Image (cartoon, helix red, strand yellow):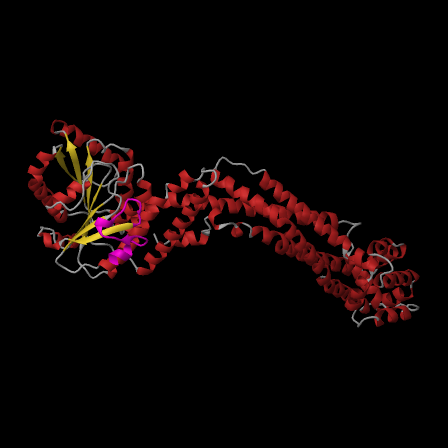
Amino acid sequence: MIKSLRNALVVSPHTEGTDLTLLHFIRTLKQRYQAMVDLDSRSTGTLSMNLEALLPSLDLAEATIEKSQLKESSKDHYRHITVIGPTQAGKSTMINWLVGESVATASPLAGYTVHPQGFAFGPSPLSEEAIAGYFKGYQRIPRSSLHANDLHAFSLESLSSLGTSLNDVVLWDTPDFDSVDSTRYQHAVLRVAALSDLLLITLSKDKYGDLSVWEFLKLIEPLGQPTTLIINKTDPDARAILLKSLEEKWRQFRADPLPEIITFPYWSEAERSSHESDCHQLLIDALRRLRESRQAKPQDPPTLRLIKSHWTSWTAPILLEHGFETQWQERLDRIQKDAIDRYQRDYLNHPNHYETFQKALAELLTLLEIPGLGGALVAARSVVTWPVKQLSKMGRLASGMGSDSQGSEVLMLNQLAQHAMIEISESVLLARTQDPLEQRWWDNMRMRLVSQRPEILNAFETASKAYATDFQPEIDQTARGLYEHLQEHPVVLNTLRATRVTTDAAALAVALHTGGIGVQDFVIAPAMLSLTSILAEGALGHYMNRAQTQLQQRQLEAVRRLFKESIINPLKSLPLEMDPSLRIGISPQTLTSIKELL
């Protein structure tokens, strides 16, 4: 009779690839939330209530996908019928009535049954190994050997010899889902619930109104399993009032139609024994009606219905974390903009502090071959190989120029880096929120900033020096461009070569390259100021202004890259380097790709 129930349970097509992707996502999410709950339970406990409430639905979703995989891989034709319910509702009694024999141990004690217990009725072969694989992490143990202290166990026994009217059915007795210790074995209850093809929800007149009961019934609603409600231990005189109240509760928590309700009155032990045969037939007939009922086929398979119903609550912490990371990136963007603005204001566009173009003029002067200075230039050039880039490198190795030529700009860059680190640290230190998840995120960022700050600043100092060296070819290129433009104007070029001011400035350039003076002394020397005025007023003036502007633009881009690569990128990666137990770590791209599957 029960065999034909499989014809009424049609699952919508669902590709294996989608199942695997969703399963990986759900497992990852459950693992991350569980790790955060475990960590939090050892410290403040402020997050546990929020995240722990999401774990049951994730457990159920994981089990639902694995149930579909079990059905695809298993060759048997068995249907799984589960009796489920709260404490002392009479679940084991219902099992015994269904079977017509005493196979499940009933007890008046709450939480007496703490393991899933399956009873298989043939005659067809049962894929016991596949079912054992479905209960991953649980050891299959004979029912007589189950121990209350070992919750990671289940039993599955073949009772085909009993001559029951059940055929090709696995009947499951389940632990209570509302007892004080139910959280310890809730995972097992949800796994059996997901496995079920038919549900017999057993309640009692004392427990049917409990919030925990209806929260559980709401949780499993998306599975859409054919269901019968059994109300045990009722008062016949109050049956009508009880049914009305039950219907109101169902409509309050569930959107699907109210299923068939069967009631059993409260009986003494002697009375119950005399009614067992009638109860057996009543339950068997209820299963037959359940099989023959025409239920509307939902558009989505159970997995998608379940995920869609919990998507908002599941992803709320993820979106919150994305918000933290967005805020972090916005702070970094502000820090970078502030540093670059300060660099432009205090150095690049500052008339007294900007010295890079003066270095280009110094390179230009070494190219002019000023009479009377040829010997000095030849002597300077003989120290290293031409071109001027190598000459200038020699000068930078000298103590005077080495500290001054790099130091002025590099010192400012390192000061800006230190200011940026102080500013970002203060912004994180002042971050205060009422949300415990957000507060813990920012607190962890603050600790990471404290530990990483010396390393980042040291790396930036090294990078800034490398930048100053690597940018020298740009200065050389500007000087050569100026010289080539002068060659197009031989009159001006010859005039410069014959000018005393130019000669004096060239002598300063030699001193600069050989380490005799620093850049600041070179810039403010009267000969250089006069030469700059001559160049600005002559035919080279317009070209010189354009060359300086282009050099500044290239320099600005180089400094912007320096800050991004040596300050912003290391800071940007800090959230990714958090302890996995402190962050969920599911990217917006991953979340979008999963949502597109729904």
Magenta stretch encompasses residue 544: no
State which region is magenta: 130-152
Residue depicted at 14% across the width and 27% down the height: 238
Would residue 201 be found to the left or right of residue 595 on screen? left
Would residue 121 be found to the left or right of residue 134 on screen? left
Would you place residue 150 above or below residue 274 in this image?
below
Residue 348 position within the rendered picture, expressed as x and y whole percent measured from the top left: 73, 52
Residue 125 seen: yes
Would residue 504 be found to the left or right of residue 135 on screen? right
As rendered, which of 523 and 241 lies closer to the eye? 241
Residue 196 seen: no
Question: In which quadrant of the rendered view does residue 390 lie?
Answer: bottom right
Report the label total.
0
Residue depicted at 62% across the width and 46% down the height: 335
As rendered, which of 10 and 243 lies closer to the eye? 243
Residue 69 position within the rendered picture, expressed as x and y whole percent measured from the top left: 28, 58
Would you place residue 349 above or below residue 543 in this image?
above
Return the residue found at the far top.
Answer: 237
Residue 450 position within the rendered picture, expressed as x and y whole percent measured from the top left: 61, 46
As rendered, which of 197 and 349 lies closer to the eye? 197
Magenta stretch encompasses residue 148: yes
Residue 146 position within the rendered picture, expressed as x and y whole percent measured from the top left: 25, 48
